[in-house]
Amino acid sequence: MPDFPIPKNLRDSAVLVPIFRDAQGEMQVVMVRRAAFGVHAGQLAFPGGKHEPTDASLQATALREAFEEVHLPPTDVEVLAALPTVDVPSGFRIAPFLGRIRRPAAWQWQTSEIDEVLEIPLRHLADAANHTEEVWQLAGWPGPYLVPFYRVGNGYQLWGASYRIIQPLIPRLLAGEWEM
């Protein structure tokens, strides 16, 4: 997909890329499906949001937002790495942070922003059968573009900034670069 124009003045934001091992020892990536409003309605994303002046750092933003959106306490997150930033056409520079988490007994979420919390097996994303690309023409796009994405449960498509964050991470996680 060709790069869309990126605004010159980007607003800082941050996301947490939460990973945990399930009872069978499989790595799971936690994502949210955004509520049905706004520019990212219905899209899969990592918990996160805009940097606020009260946040001590972008890492603090990611942890605050993860707590606000999916009730994941910062004490249940071990930040393993700051990942490369992703600039997006909607005017944000996203700072992703990889975090090993202690999974809550049951996920709770802020229903005004989130429709669902998903646990996606990392091996599912690593399986080439679940990776594809299609030509899409979305509202506000200057033309049709070839968009790479992962197919995940319930017919969802993981694409865009979230795809750009997780795609280079998958082989690194599976190779054991970080102790999970």
Image (tube, rainbow, N blue to C red):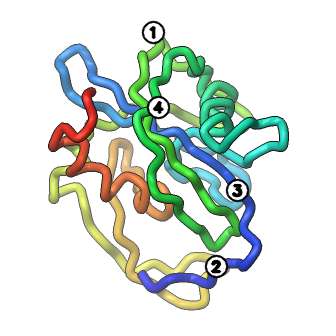
Q: Secondary structure at mark 3?
A: strand
Residue positioned 45% across, 78% down in the render? 136
Report the mark closest to the observer, 1 or 4.
4
Q: Amino acid at mark 4?
A: Val
Closer to the N terminus: mark 3 or mark 2?
2
Crowd band around label 4 with a 10 angstrom C-alpha radius: few (<14), some (14–19), many (20+): some
- Mark 4 = which residue? 79
Closer to the N terminus: mark 3 or mark 4?
3
Report the mark closest to the observer, 4 or 2.
4
Camera-nearest residue between 62 and 156 = 62
Q: Amino acid at mark 2?
A: Ile
Closer to the N terminus: mark 1 or mark 4?
4
- Mark 1 = which residue? 105
**Left or right: residue 159 compared with residue 24:** right
Closer to the N terminus: mark 4 or mark 2?
2
Residue positioned 27% across, 23% down in the render? 21
Q: Is residue 162 above or below residue 137?
A: above
Camera-nearest residue between 81 and 49 = 81
- Mark 2 = which residue? 6
- Mark 3 = which residue? 12
Q: CA distance from mark 1 to mark 4?
A: 20 Å
Q: CA distance from mark 4 to mark 2?
A: 28 Å
**Left or right: residue 80 compared with residue 177:** right
Whole-percent x and y of residue 30?
43, 34
Q: Amino acid at mark 3?
A: Asp
Q: Secondary structure at mark 1?
A: loop
Q: Is residue 11 above or below residue 77?
A: below
